[in-house]
Image: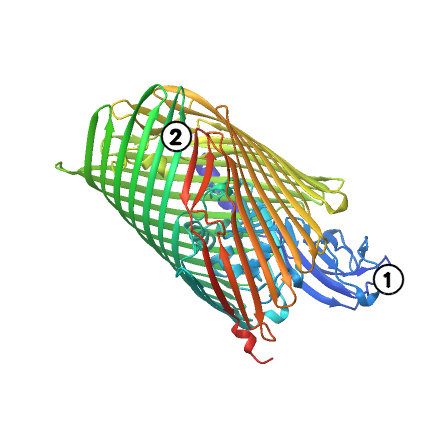
Amino acid sequence: MKNIIFILLLGFCFAESLGQKSKNIVFANDKKTPLTQNLDSVLVFKSKGNDFEFDKAQRNVSSPFEYTVNSSQVYQFIFYHSCCVPFYKIIDTDSLKEGQIIKVDFGEKLINLKELEVKEQRDRFSQSGDTTFIFTNPDDTRPHAAASSLFDRVIGLSNDLGRISVLGKNVREVTIDGRRLFGGQPSLSLDAIKADMIEHMEFVEKLLPSGQTTNSLNIKLKNDSKNMAYGTIDAARGFDKEYLANGRVNKITNSGFFNAFVTSNTINKRGLDTKSLDLMRINAFGDAMNTTGSVIGLYDNGKIDFEDNFSDFEAKLQGTNRYSDAGLNYTLTKSKLELYSFFLANNLMGNVNQHTYSQIFLGSQTQHLINEQTQLNNERTLNANISLKYKLSERTTFRFSNVLNLAKGNRNWTDYTISVFDKNMVGSENNLLLKNNNTQIENAFNSSLILNGKKPGTLTSFLINYQFRQNLNDNQFENDLYFSNTDFLQKGTQNLRPILNTGKLQINHAKPITKRILLEANLKFSLISNSNKLTDKLQLENPVLKSISENNKLLETGLYALYQRPKIKVITGINYLYWDIKRQTNQEINNKPEDFLISPFTKIETKINKKPLWLRFATEVNLPSWSQVGSLPDSSNINKITNGNIFLNPYLQRNLEFGTSASLKNGVQTNFTIGYTKYLSPIISDNLLNPVFNIISNTYINSPNANESFNINLRIFRIKMNGKFSFFNISSFNHIKSYQKTNETFSQVKTNVLYNNANATFKYSKNVILKLSLNSNLNWLKGNLIFTNNLTLTNNLELGKKWYFDTKIVSPFFMDLRKDIGLIPIIDFELGKYFLKNNNFKGSFFLMNLVNYNKIWTVSQSANFQSNQTTNYLPRVIGFQITFYPETLRKK
């Protein structure tokens, strides 16, 4: 049977395609009169599998607009005119005749002013398929401001400490005219260009059949901004010796980009955190097949975890820190070659003090924890990436990428914990002293070959990738545990050596069999080899070695079909997954028998009265993570004892999702989704209470009971380019039922989470803009209700042509586990002025944390856990800053 499937796949992969012909079409005001009115611009996109790719942009169209199209292709035309709303037209060229005239109807007119007073009045956000076009105004930002400032000032765009989002949806990658800077990392890319260089932005949201969502933002530059050099120099000094220093140099040419920056500060201006670095590595290396080697979009079982909405309530700037970062980017694009490379260095020195009260629900018992923790951290990272794309011929492309990551951290950690159980009111106390040194080496290699057939949609791709990661983790620790009149003292050292290796070979082939149906097949073979070694050396005892390893062989093959018409699109497929897994410790061996599973999925999209509807059903296989399999007991912290389980089995996840969107009156738009997920034989915690020390240890098991989750999401927004009032609102409700095991007894935990994010902007005049953001989170767990709100209020006031005054208030407001109400306003001011004719310099006086709060409170809740936490915060800072824009001295 396996041989038959393999032969069928290979036969399908190398089928050939047919040629194509071209036709000429004419656009007109009506069926007889050619389109001759002056158009602002016309954008043309052509189909590429299940997606559209940019084909051409034509501006200031004054003559009759004609266009040559290829047969067996779907085109999308967008006409822009300052008088009216944009006109969209999707054309299937197989239904056209040579020289056919197509009517262009702009519909609703936006203004009725005298010709000399006409100003462009269009929606800021314009939707077309899976692409949202975002338009900007000259007065959206101040002179020489970076593009990132748009996400601070424009409603619907958000910059939350470097996490960029559009209409509440996180942006994973940013490209400039389709090219990456710094691996596509959003905040670095937006800081490398200026707001007044942007013509428009294109936000693309794709829901892959695997259930992953990938969001990208492409920025289209103005023609006069594509060959220039510019930069920024910043320096700031506080009255208490705080400082900020920042320098940036950028060069844009017709063939690419050069960007360099260096920055350092002691006022908690966040540099590159670990999530940003992880995202750059993913963009530069991962998902190559999902974006280039598949027409339907594909189906990798690997999941990528991103921050969700609830992270808005984490202590985002914990402690007091000194950040230092440097980066270098070089992007080269030629007719056949695209080269992307970047180098980043980061150094963080931090001081974090936390006090936490938490509850862990363990069936019939509840563990109460009081924790005092101090950390002195020094983390250093070095990242380098080079990737290239080379067109061997018109239809053959070779891609290569290599990522190197080096990280070294030192940490001194003191931890005092009191643990009490409801049924045993005698508490245990533990003092932990820990010195940690950790070095991580990671390298990832990726190479692919993509062959496009003569017929659109025909594609064959080959991918090889290899990833290696090793940690050298050394701890020197001391635990002093006191319980029931017994004092237990433990001193020692620990050396942890995890090594992870993953290799993958994948082949994809897609071919349209009719003008409406496209088939795609894939074959993927993976080798996974992981190991973990732990050496414990307690005082006055011999070293103890613990080890665990796994070797996995995975074979996945699938056949998928896409059926598409103007009003309906169906994607369906079936996956065959075969695995051979061998795991062992230095005491046990688990050679799992060979096994396989067939998993189907289907997604249907249609339109009713021009309103899209979609329904998706999928069965997915999830393998246990390495942390669930390969964790070894950590003797350096006896408050957290976790042991992996080599006998874990894969589990199934069944998803059912429904969604729709609509445009209502007065420019209001909505998006609604509802989903249900059932996890069969999920992996859950197996907890064991140690009565000797009054502590909990845990491992993982497959549950005989299913976990379930149900969610509802609603987005509603109204955003006008020059309107005085705009808003958008995101609401979601999640109901989660999960199981856990404690002392051989299973128990169910039900969690309900209601999240709401409301944003509004009021533009009183060109010089006064008020922006309000309110994030609210309500949780119900075990009869306990907690809520958190995070209010952000910004006011941008222009005082004439040179002066400005900005105010920002960030105010967490919450009710904690003790039903106490907390309100903590963090208030910042900045008063500034631009100098000289071309605004060459900017000077400002700033005040951070006016009320001088030295702690931030957070409350959180998850499946069986809830906590109150306070973290030290940067005290009041008063200082001056000067900014210089070197390019303004250049003679024009």
Residue 170 position in % (x across, y down)? 54, 48
Give the side of residue 694 with respect to residue 850, left or right: left
Amino acid identity at mark 1: Thr
Residue 704 position in % (x across, y down)? 43, 22
Tell me which corner region of the image, top left, top right, bottom left or bottom right, holds residue 747. Answer: top left
Tell me the quadrant of the picture where the N terminus can be found.
Answer: top left
* Helix, strand or loop for disc 2: loop
Labelled disc at residue 538: none
Tell me which corner region of the image, top left, top right, bottom left or bottom right, holds residue 454. Answer: bottom right
Q: Residues within 10 Å of mark 2 (few under 14, many from 20)?
A: some
What separation in Å lies between label 2 and label 1 (alpha carbons)? 68 Å
Give the side of residue 384 with respect to residue 43, left or right: left
Residue plotted at (33% across, 25% down): 420
Residue 703 position in % (x across, y down)? 41, 24
Instruction: Answer whether residue 455 is visible to the viewer in this image.
Output: no
Labelled disc at residue 649: 2
Residue 741 position in % (x across, y down)? 38, 23
Give the side of residue 365 with respect to residue 182, left or right: left
Tell me the quadrant of the picture where the C terminus can be found.
Answer: bottom right
Labelled disc at residue 33: 1
584 or 259, nearer to the observer: 259
Residue farthest toward the right in the current orientation of the protein:
32
Q: Earlier in the sequence, mark 2 or mark 1?
A: 1
Amino acid identity at mark 2: Asn
**Is the residue 680 above or below the residue 520 in the image?**
above
Instruction: Answer whether residue 322 is visible to the viewer in this image.
Output: yes
Residue plotted at (21% across, 24% down): 485
CB contact under 8 Å: marks 2 and 1: no
**Is the residue 849 above or below the residue 362 in the image?**
below
